[in-house]
Amino acid sequence: MRKGKKYPAIPILGLMTYLKERAPTEYAKRFAQLGYVALAFDPRYRGESSGDSMGKVEDAKALVKFLASLSMVDDEQLLDLHYAEEVQKC
């Protein structure tokens, strides 16, 4: 990334049962390779975080606000990625 340049940003939010060390981290790496500021995170009730799932929306809002505050982020190009994984029944 070049100093002074602004980049699009993407917070990566996953399933209720995911951990940032899994698929979200891989997505973040891929988006970074494409020139995005990408950040995967665990909401307050996942991974090493504490709290309950009622805070997921507030956590997502805080993440977007954090990304928008970074000087390298073009706050008019803030995207957001929610993804789901299909479960196959046998």
Image (cartoon, rainbow, N blue to C red):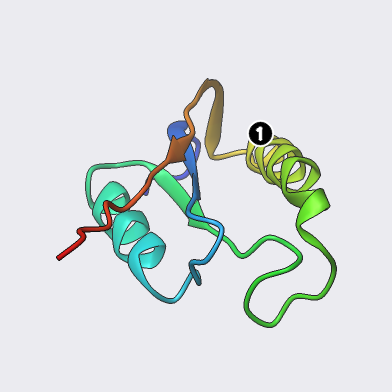
Q: Position of residue 76 (x, y in %)?
A: 55, 17
Left or right: where does residue 30 sit relative to residue 79? left
Q: How many marks?
A: 1
Q: Which residue is painted at 48% across and 67% down in the image?
A: 18
Q: Residue at x 43, y 33 (%)?
A: 7
Name the amino acid type tagged 1.
Ala
Residue 39 in the image: x percent, y percent? 50, 54
> How far across and down, in percent of the image, does residue 38 sit?
44, 49
Q: Nearer the viewer, residue 51 or 59?
A: 51
User: Which quadrant is the C terminus positioned in?
Assistant: bottom left
Q: Secondary structure at mark 1?
A: helix
Where residue 13 appears, x then y in whole percent? 52, 49
Residue drawn at point x = 31 percent, y = 53 percent: 85
- Residue under pointer 1: 68
Dividing the picture into quarters, in which one does residue 8 lie? top left
- Residue extending farthest top: 76
